[in-house]
Every structure is written in structure tokens, then in C-alpha cells.
Amino acid sequence: MIAEIGHYALVLALALALIQATLPMIGARIGDRALMAISEPVAVVQFLFVALSFAALTALYVTSDFSVANVFENSHSQKPLIYKISGVWGNHEGSMLLWALILAIFGAMVAIFGTNLPASLRANVLGVQSWIAAAFQLFILATSNPFARLAQAPFEGRDLNPILQDVGLAVHPPLLYLGYVGFSISFSFAVAALIEGRIDAAWARWVRPWTLAAWMFLTLGIAMGSYWAYYELGWGGWWFWDPVENASLMPWIAGTALLHSAVVMEKRNALKVWTILLAILAFSLSLLGTFLVRSGVLTSVHTFASDPSRGVFILAILVFFIGGSLALFAWRAPALKQGGLFAPISREGALVFNNLFLTTACATVLVGTLYPLALEGLTGDKISVGAPFFNATFGPLFLPLMIAMPFGPLLAWKRGDLLGAAQRLMAAFGIALIAMAATFAIAQGGPVLAPFLIGIAFFAMAGALTDLAERTLLFRQPLSVSLRRFVGLPRSTIGTAIAHFGIGICLLGVAAEANYGAERILAMKPGQTVSLRGYDLTFNDLLSRNGPNYRELLAQFTVKSDGETIGTLEPSKRTFPARNSATTEAALLTRGVSQLYLSLGDVGTDGSIAVRIYYKPLVLLIWLGPVIMVLGGGMSLSDRRLRVGAPGRAKKSALQPAE
Amino acid sequence: MTRKQRRLVLIGSGLIVLAIAALLVLTALRDSIVFFNSPTDVVEKKVTAGSRIRLGGLVQPGTLERKDIDAAFDVTDGKNVIRVTYRGILPDLFREGQGVVAEGTLIDVASFRADTVLAKHDENYMPKEVADALKKQGHWKDDYGKKPGAAAPQGASK
């Protein structure tokens, strides 16, 4: 019964989405207020039906109703409750339903909190949003029905892929989708603006909070996914330039560019056409990511099932929305009025520089991701484009950006003073040089590029702080004056500094982890001790243990530093009988922001076990950086200027979308 | 500067960055891509010794030898066989008789030194490239592809 309710609710949601996609837009065209006003209640009710559908699927998972094919294939009655719930989106059908749910959430948020938008713009935005919602709901109903029943209900399910049985699955996909789908709002706003043929600074103020919120979720989602891969896959890497990772990175880069260009549009009424294009591109790349991941063109841990009809359907959605919006752009964009003038050296110029490098870097990632697919299609040659390609292309484009980043906020609008900015950055530059020299001295030679990268990281961090110090007249005025000025600073200025500081932190972690780590792979016997970077690891014992739905082989290690025991590590290998598969659970020991990483290989005939030990210096900074960036984004989001988008009621509640 | 000049500066710098990016991409594509080959491809395409490739096929049952963390095994596509040596930890789902993709250097036409070994995650899963290569050689068994559940090439990198 529950399955049928869920299915029926989704059908009703689709019907509502179709109404919302047509009537309000017609209303906006002919200026009929009553028709336009339909959009808000319909958006909310549509959300309620999708939510009901999602709740039904969750209920089926929690009660382990194996008469439903999807539950049978991906769940197990012995599975812990959290994995029963997260298992809802640990498969193709369920994850698409989650996607549809988040689309509906965002639609309802705009309907509820967008009361200060002009009626026709709101009707168009909700209309476009509903086109997307309808397409995905139709996709689920036509090709990926999660509620399909089995003729004969089995007694036990086939269990979830063990690698997905982790808290990571509970957090990573929802965050990532909130980001991906969040860009649909910027997209809808852009398309609505093109349909209306009118765009101004107020438009940018309405779009920015949504973009910022989506960007924050996507940042967290990517960072979370990276940390999950790091500890779950058991080989110590945190980013593999896997096509699926690239699929999430590309919308992030485009979204970052969009955030920056929207600032120019909001403050200076310039770069309007470009901002619209970026809003379209950011969501197009999200759609492309979904296509790559869900269609089975690529094989990866994210590809749940490859069914050609699904691939074709998603490709059709992709072509319709990307092609349609770009065609609309080509047709209507020339009609948009040009914005203000600015000199190349100015805040606007710096933001253009940012956009130029970000989009180019994004394009190189796109080439690296699609080239193997294109080549296979054209010549049949199979190739893999891996980390060396991206290090050689993305890296050189990203570094100038990092160097230029501290300059941007120090330049004035319209016409800036590069020399003045450079003078004010002298302290930051000094800190960077000291960091570089110190690294070089500590590492005693070593890789040449690494101290340079660390210098850039420090330059970015110190540069971000310089901006705040300059604005608060730190050290030039009494501390109380600086403090008062700091409190008076716009929140978005503080947010910018925090986010820029965060990316510096992240780069520091990346550079240290990549260049100064240590690694040992060896076979160890019980009682044996091995040392790595001053840590002595003793292999004590090997024992086996039963988990709720697996058996595990556990190795116990004691870690000593200078003769003192500082902790134990218990890496394990788990076998899951339901799927006859295995996972390796790495063990981590955190020392400050560095980590010792230990994972197991095979047990030898002589009782020894293969182990892989890593020392990863400053590795936690890689994920701490993005968290700081998100905090900066949150700070910026709380800026009251973003709330007072237009005359009318303060748009306070728009600040907490999708919570 | 006039509006026109400013726009020229903007477009010019855009083109320069794009040109640099294109140059980077082209060099990187020449130097850092890795071709996938089956053992038969290695023989037929006369892949030069010393080149870096991905080698895919089935692990020939009964050929796996291990000593400490050194492993050696035969990779076959039913027609040709290449001996692969690897030092490191093999992935969890590395099994004899099942699909594997190894990345490394070709020593000669019959031996290969791997620095990365990718295996499949799922019992029923076969790396896509391997499946295609096997189909080409007529050694595809239908049951490999029956239940393509959640699956991924899982790696062990040195």
C-alpha cells in the first residue's frame, strides 16, 4: 500500500509540475495576475507530494519491505537503521527521487520567500523551475520507478554495496544534490530574465543568496565526498580526478565564477550578459554531471546501474535544457542593455580576471573528462586521462588565480591602484617568503615546487587578512578603533576574507600532503615493529569479529612516539556475505592536523599481513579549508544588503534555504 | 581609454589565457594520457616496450604467485597472455579468473610491470574496457554482465 501511495503521489506531483510549468508563464506573457498567482500554491503543494513520495520510499526501506524491487536489491533486514535510511538514495532510483525532492524544495522556497520579486519574474522563475522538475519526475516514472513491486516477495534483501555502508552516504549525496540542484534556481532566474528581456542590478541581488547557498552546499558536499573516499577506499588518496569527481568539480568552478561575476553585476551593473551565461553554464554542468554519473557512460562507484534507455532519457533532458537555454541566450542576450565602464585595473577587472581563469580551468577539466569518451566514440581507442593531465593543465591555471586573489579586494571599483595594492600586500609577501624559506630549510631540499606552493598558500592567507587589517586600520589606530571599524564592516567583506583564507588553508594542506608525506608498504608478522617519521607501529594481534551484517578481520597496532604509547590503530577487512564482497576499513590516528593512515592487504600463508602505512602531514587542512570557505559564505549570506533585495518586505527568511 | 579599447583589452587577455590553456591541454594530452590495451592489442598493435599503458583482461586461474608484497599473475584475453608483476597491495576484489585492469610499463610483449592494479567492486562486475576487449576476442560469458550492481574499479596504487 505504501509503495502505491508513494508512486501515486509522484504522479500527482508531475501533474502539478506541468500545470506550474505552463499556466503561470502564459499568465506572465499576457499579464494575467490570477494565472501568475497560481505558481506559488502549486509549487508548495508539488513539494508536499514529492516529499510524501520520498517519505513512502523511506518507510519501505525502514520496514524492509522486500516486495519492492528497489528495496530488495539495495537493503537487508540486518542492516543498521542509518544505512537503511541512507540506502534510500544509495541506488539509482532513490537518488533520482532525492534529486526531484531537492528540486521541489528549492521551488517551494522561492514560492514562499520570493514575495518581494516582481510578479511576472516570480511566475517565470517558478515556471522554468517546474519544467526541470517535470522532466526529472517524468524520468523517474518512465524509466526508474523506485516503487516497482516484485511478483514474489523474497525473504531477504541483497544488501547495499558495502562500500556505501558508511555515514558518508548519509551526508555526501544530499549535500552534493543541494548544491547541484541549488544552481537550478540561478538557472531559472537567468532563463526567466531572458524571457522577460530585462535584467538589472536587483536581479543579481535576488540571485546571489540562492547561488551562494547552493555553492556552500556543493563545497561541503565535494569536501565530504573527498574525505569519504580518503578513508573508505583504503589507499590514502583524497582526489583522483575521476570523471565523476570532475563532474562535481565543474559546476563548483562555474558556480564560484558566477558568485564573483554576480558581485560586479550587483555593484556596478556590468557583466550582465556574462553573468546570465554563467548561471546557465553552472546548472548545465550540473546536468552534465548527472548524465555522466547516471547514464552508465562511465564506470565508477557512483554508477548504480547502466540501462541504455535511462542514458538516452537523461541525454534528452540534457540536450533540451542546455540547448534550449543556450539558444534562448543567443536569441535574447543581445537585446539586454550593456552595463557600466571600468578600467582593466580595478575591482571589476580583478573579478573578470577571476572569471577568465576559473572558466578556462573549468574548460580544461571538461576536456579531460570528455576527451576519452569522444576518442572512444570516434576511433575506438580507449584511453584514460588521469592526474598527470589535470596537474599539468588545471594547476598552472589555478596558481595565477591564487596569486591574484589577495589583490582583488584591495583594488577600488572602476579604477584601481595596482602599485598601492602591492605596497599594502608587502607584509603578506614577506610572510610568504618566510614560509617558503622555512619550508625549504625544514625539508632540506626536497621537491622544488613544494615550497613555492606553500609560499602561495601563505600569501593567500595573509593577503585575506591584509584586506581586513587595511579596512580596520589595524596597528595604525588604537585597537578599540580597529575593533569598532571591524564590527561596522559589511558582513560580505568579512565573508570574502574568510573564504579566501580558507582556500589558502586548503592549498597548504594539498601541497604538504602531496610533497612531504611518507609511505611504507610491507608484510608484517605479529610482534613486529615498523617505524615511519618517528612513529613506531607494533603489530600486536590479528583477530576476527562479527558485525551486524559482516564478518571482519581486525589487526591491532600500538603506536608509540619517543617510547610513549600515543594510541592504537585497528584497521580491518570486512566481508559481506549478502553480496559476497569485501571492504577494507583504514584506521586513522590524528596528530594535530596530520594523520597516520593504516590499511590492510592480504593475509599471507605464514601468518603475516600486508600493510600500507602513510604519514600524511597537514592532511586535515585539505578539508578544513573548504569548511572555512563555507563559513565565509555563511557570513556573506547573513549580510543585510543581500536581504534588502528590493523595496518591500525584508527578505530575511531567504537566508536559510533548504534547511 | 575608450569603451572600444577597454573591450579590446578584455577580449585580448581572454584570448591569451585561452591560448595558454589550449597549449597546456595539447601538451598534456600528448604526454600524459594512457591507452588501454588487451594482451592481443599489445601483440597486434605492436605496442613499443617501455611505453605506459593500461592492460586489461582476466586473471588466468592458477597463475597468481605471491611473496610478501610482491605479486605476479597472468592477464589473458583468451588469445594472448602477458605476465604482470606488481609490488604492493592488491585490491580487495582481486580474484583469479576475474577481470582486472593494470596500469604500468610494458617490459616486452609478454611481461608487464604494474604500479597500479584496479579490480572490480562487485562480484558480477567487470571493468567496462575488459568486457569490451573480451567480447572482441569472443570470450565473453553472458553471466559477467547480468547483474551490474553498484560497481567501481577499485584501485590499489603504489
Image (cartoon, coloured by chain):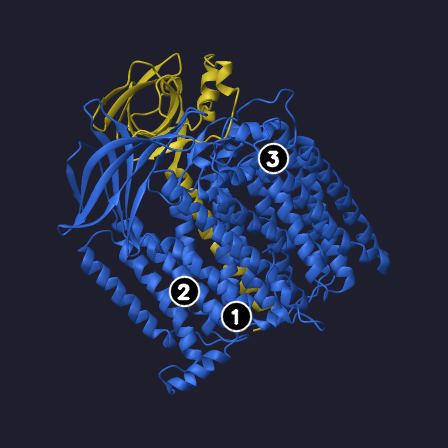
Give the structural element (helix, strand or loop) at label 3. helix
The image quadrant of residue B110 is top left
Q: Is residue B45 left or right of residue A304?
A: left
Please, what is the three-letter code of the amino acid marked with disc 2? Phe
Query: Which residue appears at 63% of the width and 65% of the height?
Result: A653
Q: CA distance from mark 1 to mark 3?
A: 44 Å
Q: Which chain is blue?
A: A
What's the residue type where badge 1 is placed? Ser
Question: Which chain has been coloured yellow in this picture?
Answer: B
Mark closer to the chain start, 1 or 3: 3
The answer to whether marks 1 and 3 mark residues whose Cβ atoms lie closer than 8 Å is: no
Residue A483 drawn at (x, y percent): 42, 81
Which disc is residue A60 wearing?
Answer: 3
Screen quadrant of the N terminus of chain A: top right
Chain letter of mark 3 equals: A
Asked if the residue under mark 3 is in contact with the one under mark 2, i.e. CB atoms within 8 Å, the reply is no
Mark 1: few, some, or many residues within 10 Å (few <14, many ≥20)?
A: many
Local crowd size for mark 2, using a 10 Å CA cut-off: few (<14), some (14–19), many (≥20):
many
Residue A431 percent location from the top left of the image: 29, 69
What number is the disc on residue A501? 2
**Residue A2 or residue A595, whichever sits in front:** A2
Subunit that carries the residue with mark 2 = A
Label 3: few (<14), some (14–19) or many (≥20) C-alpha neighbours in 10 Å:
many
Earlier-in-chain disc, 2 versus 3: 3
Ranked by sequence position, the earlier of labels 1 and 2 is 1
A20 versus A117 height, above or below: above
Instruction: Say yes or no: labels 1 and 2 on the same chain.
Output: yes
Evaluate whether label 2 is on the same chain as label 3.
yes
As drawn, B90 above or below A466: above
